[in-house]
Amino acid sequence: MTSTNGSKVSNQQVGTSVLVVMMEVDPADDEVFNKWYNEEHLPERMSIPGYISARRFMLDPEDGQANNVMRYLCIWEMEDDSPLQSQFYKDQNAKPTPTKDAAGAVVKNRARGLYRQIFPAAGGYSDRVGYTYPDGTRIGA
């Protein structure tokens, strides 16, 4: 399968923890921010053992920001939370680069949270057999 931008699309791997990061950047600064995130930050973090995958998103402009969310979102799949405690992670955070500094200067707001999986116990929920409501009405397969 190929995405609309020509890059290969693979089955997403799932860990037991996700790090969710939201950032606010003025549209005028998108190029600086995206260059750092895509060309430096993603490859840097993915080199740390325990990171599984990452996906980036941008808020749909028609949704607006009325629901108090930020324009950029990254979801990092991790085996568990150990990558955030690793020396690799600490070393990367301590190392400045010109691109990282430029991007940091344009981030107006940032929020992040580490989430641990609670259901199902492992993997992803993918039951496609449908659902029966208590009144007997059935939907789906």
Image (cartoon, rainbow, N blue to C red):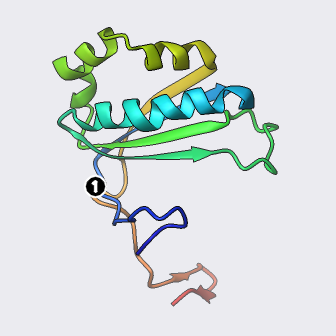
Q: Position of residue 96 (x, y in %)?
A: 36, 10
Query: Which quarter of the picture shows residue 12?
Result: bottom left
- Nearer to us in this view, 42 or 113: 42
| Residue 136 rendering spot, x and y as whole percentages | 60, 88
- Position of the N terminus by quadrant: bottom left
Q: In the picture, residue 73 is in which quadrant?
A: top right
Residue 34 in view, yes or no:
yes
Q: Position of residue 104 (x, y in %)?
A: 53, 15
Instruction: Give x and y (percent) for residue 49.
Output: 17, 36
Identify which residue is drawn at 38% across, 65% down.
Answer: 8
Q: Residue at x 45, y 42 (%)?
A: 75
Write down the quadrant of residue 40 in the picture: top left
Q: Which residue is mark 1?
A: 121
- Tell me which residue sits at (44%, 85%) in the image: 129
**Relative to residue 131, is residue 128 drawn left or right?**
left
Classify 109 as above or below 118.
above
Q: Is residue 132 above or below residue 85?
A: below
Q: Is residue 48 left or right of residue 56?
A: left
Q: How many marks?
A: 1
Q: Is residue 124 above or below residue 70?
A: below
Q: Decide which of 91, 117 is in the foreground and name it.
A: 91
Query: Can residue 26 be spotted in the picture?
Result: no
Q: Amino acid at mark 1?
A: Ala
Q: Nearer the viewer, residue 3 or 112?
A: 3
Element type at mark 1: loop
Which residue is at 21% across, 32% downward? 48
Is residue 118 depicted above or below 65 in this figure? Answer: below
Q: Quick one: label 1, few (<14), some, or many (20+) residues within 10 Å?
A: few
Q: Is residue 83 left or right of residue 2?
A: left
